[in-house]
Image (cartoon, rainbow, N blue to C red):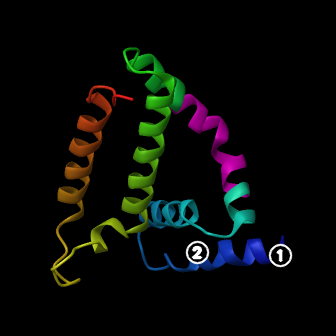
Amino acid sequence: MRLTLFRCEERLEDTVGDPPSQQASRFLGRVMFETDPAIRRLFGTEVAPVEGQYLDALLTALPHLPPDEVAFRYRAMAGLLGLHQSGSLGDLRPGRPAEAVEAADVETERLIRLLTAGLQAPAATS
């Protein structure tokens, strides 16, 4: 457990200097993609009640989709949001220099539009 807490502290220290809300967002994004199984279990235990509420809300909002499809879309949404929160999504720019970063609000608006379209798309065929 000591190593796990140390790894969490490392992730939190990576955000020093950011505004408090951005620190929390980046920290959560980084923890979501942590490879240490102990941290993933700890994070999963802490967020499970809230994630369940989000998934229930999506199931209610998307009654025309099979539950497995909604669950997949939720996981994809959570993954993209985690990348965005950690700051890593903006770094994925094939063929463009890393310093050519667009404003965060532009990136956020693009992500919202993409996720909205993805959630509203018809079910995948089996």
Residue 3: x and y, percent?
78, 77
Query: Callout 1: 10 Å neighbours few (<14), some, many (20+)?
Result: few
Residue 60 lies within the magenta run? no
State which tag comes first along the sequence, 1 or 2: 1
Which x, y percent locates residue 83? 40, 62
Q: Is residue 122 above or below residue 46?
A: above
Q: Residues within 10 Å of mark 2 (few under 14, many from 20)?
A: some
- Residue 44: x and y, percent? 67, 50
- Specify the label residue 98 is tagged with: none
Measuring 44% from the left and 53% from the top, which residue is drawn there? 79
Dominant secondary structure (helix, strand or loop) of the stretch shown in magenta: helix
What is the quadrant of residue 90 in the picture?
Answer: bottom left
Residue under the point 57% across and 38% down: 51
Residue found at the far front of this picture: 126
- Residue at 17% across, 69% down: 102
Total tally of numbered discs in the picture? 2
User: Disc number at residue 11?
Assistant: 2
Part of the protein shown in magenta: 42-54
Q: Amino acid at mark 1?
A: Arg
Q: Nearer the viewer, residue 28 or 113?
A: 113
Return the residue nearer the eye: 93 or 9. Answer: 93
Secondary structure of the residue carrying tag 2 is helix
Q: Is residue 6 above or below residue 22?
A: below
